[in-house]
Structures are given as structure tokens and as C-alpha cells.
Image (spheres, rainbow, N blue to C red):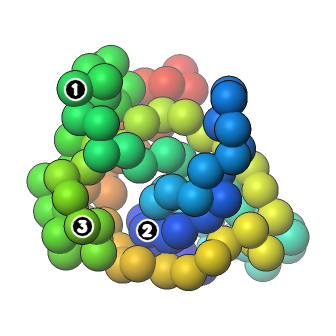
């Protein structure tokens, strides 16, 4: 598990749990001592991803996503065992922009 990897995960939402793509946000140092992983939501609902803390991925196909997608600063910590599979990795540009959005969201 590496920061910036795009994974499939059973993501608990407000209404229901749904299998969806997410991006690993936690560091390799974090993973070396913790049984969990911090992830952020990836959505294909671009029209709803309009907040300053959202980011429309530019290289979504290279990350293994099937449709245009956006990162949303909806963060969650889950057991590493919750990861279903790995899809790909965000490009350097997209990963940098996701980190900017996380810093904006967290202050």
C-alpha cells in the first residue's frame, strides 16, 4: 500500500455501504505500525464535486478508473483488510492536487 494508490474498498457512507474506488492517503510509515489505512473518496459524479476541497482528476484513465472521476475530501480510516483490490496509481499531478485539497480541508 502506497499513498496515491487507487483501490476498491467497501466504503461506508451516510446512507449505505457501497463498493467504490478510493485513494490511499496514509503514508508507508503509518502503514508500518498500524493495521488500518486512511482513504479518500473517488466519485464519478463530477457535477457534485464542486467544493474547493474537491478535485477533478486529470489522468483518471492512467489511475485505472473507467470513467472521468473526482477526488472528494470525504476521509475515512478502515482496516487494511477492507481493501478489495488495487486499480492503479494517481499521476504525480493528480496526487499533488489531492494533497493540496487535503491540506485545505484539514487546515
Residue sitting nearer the eye, 8 or 92: 8
| Mark 2 or 3, nearer chain start | 2
Q: Which residue is tagged 3?
A: 66
Cα distance between the residues tagged 2 and 3:
12 Å
Q: Which residue is tagged 1?
A: 47
Residue farthest along the left direction in this orientation: 58
Up/down of 70 relative to 63, above or below? above
Cα distance between the residues tagged 1 and 2:
21 Å
> What is the secondary structure assignment of the residue under circle 3?
loop
Cα distance between the residues tagged 1 and 3:
17 Å
Relative to 102, 58 lies left or right: left
**Quadrant in which residue 34 is drawn:** bottom right
- Residue 52 placement (x, y as % from top left): 31, 20
Residue at the spot 28% in from the left edge and 67% down from the top edge: 65
Q: What label sits on residue 6 in the rendered view?
A: 2
> What is the secondary structure assignment of the residue under circle 1?
helix
| Mark 1 or 3, nearer chain start | 1
Amino acid at each position: 500500500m502506497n499513498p496515491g494508490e487507487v483501490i476498491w474498498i467497501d466504503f461506508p457512507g451516510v446512507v449505505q455501504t457501497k463498493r467504490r474506488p478510493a485513494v490511499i492517503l496514509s503514508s508507508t510509515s503509518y502503514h508500518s505500525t498500524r493495521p488500518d489505512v486512511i482513504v479518500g473518496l473517488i466519485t464519478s459524479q463530477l457535477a457534485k464535486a464542486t467544493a474547493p476541497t474537491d478535485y477533478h482528476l486529470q489522468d483518471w484513465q492512467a489511475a485505472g478508473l473507467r470513467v472521468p472521476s473526482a477526488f472528494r475530501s470525504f476521509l475515512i480510516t478502515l482496516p487494511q483488510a477492507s481493501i478489495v483490490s488495487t486499480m492503479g496509481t494517481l499521476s504525480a499531478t493528480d496526487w499533488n492536487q489531492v494533497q493540496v485539497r487535503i491540506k485545505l480541508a484539514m487546515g
